[in-house]
Every structure is written in C-alpha cells, then in structure tokens.
Image (cartoon, rainbow, N blue to C red):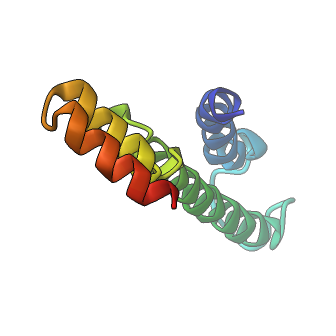
Amino acid sequence: MNRLITALVPIILTSVSAAPVLAQSYSDRDWGWHSAWGWGHMMFGGLTMIVFWGAIIVLVVVLVRWLAVVGPAGSGASSAQPRTPLEILQERFAKGEIDKKEYDERKKTLLE
C-alpha cells in the first residue's frame, strides 16, 4: 500500500500542477475578462490550489505514520510486543549475566 502511494503521489501532483497550463488555449493569452474562458480560470486555479495543498498534507500524514511504525533505523520497535519478565530472565541467563542457581530462584519467584 505504501509503495502504491509513493508511486502515485508524484504522478498526481504533476498532473494537478500541470492541469491549468494544459487547460489554457493558445489564443487566450491576453488575460482579459472578455476571454472565452471567463471566470473559469480563477475557479479552476483555486480548486487546483486546494487539491495541491490537500495532497501535500496527506503525503506528510502518510510519511509521519510510516516513520512512526518503522521507528528509527528500521528497527520496528514500536510494533514489537513488550517482553515478559520470564523472557528477560531467560535472556539474562543465556547471556551469562546470572548463574543457574539464581536463574532457578528468580524463575520460581516469577511463576508463583
């Protein structure tokens, strides 16, 4: 989903920003109120501005949410389940921080 959004955002922004230029005919260069387009340029320009800033805001929100899920350096820390005290005890025993006797005592205490 994120890759799809990342691929579509530049296409949408380019299309939206180029649309007013493409909509203007070559004979409509005098910028007068008597042109064939009338007030349409002003309305379309305002709509384009709203769509453009809306797309920028959506892009920023998606980026912030993506960074919040991934966490720093792609660790995925925010999505990991918290470890139980028994898992921490097993890890300390595996690292050699505590000996078998202390491990058994603390495990017994935790399981009571």
Query: Hey, which quadrant is residue 7 in on the image?
Result: top right
User: Image point 31% across, 49% down: which residue?
Assistant: 105
The answer to whether residue 94 is left or right of residue 83 is left
Q: Nearer the viewer, residue 32 or 37?
A: 37
Q: Do we see residue 72 in this rendering?
A: no
- Which residue occupies the extreme left position in the image? 97
Residue 14 locus on image (x, y percent): 61, 37
| Relative side of 104 to 46, left or right | left
Where, quadrant-wise, is the N terminus in this rendering? top right
Q: Residue at x 68, y 64 (%)?
A: 45
**Above or below: residue 34 compared with residue 30:** below
Identify whether 59 is placed above or below 76. Answer: below
At 12% from the left and 36% from the top, the residue drawn is: 97
Residue 96 position within the rendered picture, expressed as x and y whole percent measured from the top left: 15, 28
Task: State whether residue 81 appears in this view.
Answer: yes
Residue 34 falls left or right of residue 111: right
Left or right for 27, reference 11: right
Q: Residue 4: which quarter of the image?
A: top right
Residue at the location (79% across, 63% down)? 35
Q: x and y percent of residue 53 in the render?
A: 58, 64
Total marks shown come to 0
